[in-house]
Amino acid sequence: MKAKIYAAISLAALVLLLPPGGFSAWTWLEGLRWVYLFLMAFLACMVLSPVTVWLAWRVGAVDRPGARKIHTAAIPRIGGAAVYAAFTLTILRNQQIPVEVWGILLGGTIIFILGFVDDCRQLSAAARLFWQAVAALAVALFGLHLSFPLKMPFGYPLSVLLSVIWLVGITNAFNFMDGIDGLASSMGVVCALLFLGLGWNSSQYALSFMSAALAGSCAGFLTINWRPARAFLGDSGSTFIGFILGCLALYGSWATNNPVVAISTPLLILGIPIFDIIYTTVSRIRNGSVRNVREWLEYAGKDHFHHRLMYLGMKAEYAVGFIVLLNVCLGLGAWTMRRTVTSVGTWLLLAQSVIIFIIVVVLMVLGREQTVEKRG
């Protein structure tokens, strides 16, 4: 039965999406190109995901149970290969590739290869950080970097440096979030769709096309990544998703005359991963769990937001749903902020976002106390 379903999906992908004309041309004429790209990436990832499962068992890229693991059985962990391939094939098939997008594809390829090698054999923290910085630098050299520092002294070098720090930070933030079934994939879908909506609404079509491709790829992988997962993204997938989302945040033009909105929009859309990495980093430094960058990258504790929610009694799938809903709330706030005419309305929406983060802090603290009580 599964083989028949797989064959039907593969046939649908070939008939509907690959030949020129037909459905592809119709989406162009109707202004629905993003639908075509989403479906192409979705079906391509569904077709390729079982292939990555087979490959993982062949090369031994399997995540086995352990003290710091939630799963109780060995799970293939290079599912990110399907996400990367589906995204890249969709972008190339669309044939709308500005120079900055070539930079994103190059940087994303470096990140994927780095993660794939790390999934197959453990790399050092220094090697991972170095190649992540190289990938981010490649994107910046292709013209995609922060614009606001350009008017400052040493504006261009400063812009490139801050862009590299941003991309490396978001890349690792998503990697750290990939701790329970379906979380990183679901967040990839939601964040990419929010970027898609904002981009399409403001006629930023290249941004919308990439967002649709990423959302479709993540959604396709969710079909085997939702609990109980049959495959994990692995570092090759979680870091790739984070890196591309970080690039989308740089690529978008979020507000021309309002710097508060321009800065706040991507920060809110990626708010939960950013908050999680900042909170856990500060917490680990305070309690002495990490003392340098190497230990920070290699530490694999159960102290992230999704772990704390599970300590409070949530099932894994409910924790994923709760986190996604919080991120949707932040994203809708960012969406509304762009349409708010008055500065008072903007600041009220920012205050609402701060309240959401306060709620997250309270839940993090409660989850920590619950953990301490259980250990005691």
Image (cartoon, rainbow, N blue to C red):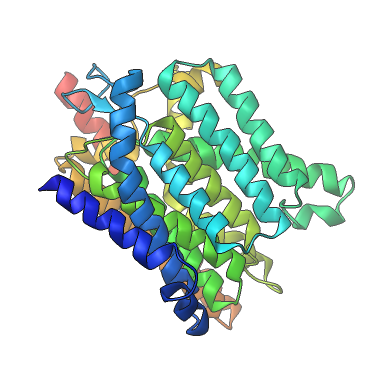
Q: Residue furthest left?
A: 1
How many callouts does the rendering have? 0
Which sits in the foreground, 315 or 31? 31
Residue 16 rendering spot, x and y as whole percentages: 37, 67
Which quadrant of the view contains residue 15? bottom left
Residue 358 rendering spot, x and y as whole percentages: 38, 51
Which sits in the foreground, 111 or 291? 111
Q: Looking at the image, which residue is at 66% across and 39% down?
A: 136
Q: Residue furthest right?
A: 153
Residue 19 against residue 50 in the figure, above or below: below
Q: Looking at the image, which residue is at 50% across and 35% down?
A: 172
Residue 350 rendering spot, x and y as whole percentages: 50, 65
Residue 318 against residue 194 in the figure, above or below: above
134 horizontally vs 265: left or right: right
Residue 112 against residue 254 in the figure, above or below: above
Is there any visible trace of residue 286 in the rendered image?
no
Residue 146 against residue 240 in the figure, above or below: below
Is there any visible trace of residue 23 in the rendered image?
yes
184 horizontally vs 206: left or right: left
Which sits in the foreground, 289 or 365? 289
160 horizontally vs 164: left or right: right
Q: Looking at the image, which residue is at 60% across and 62% down?
A: 95
Which quadrant of the view contains residue 179? top left
Residue 116 rendering spot, x and y as whole percentages: 46, 28
Which sits in the foreground, 259 or 101? 101
Q: Assign the C terminus to one quadrant of the image.
A: top left
Q: Looking at the image, which residue is at 45% across and 80% down?
A: 26
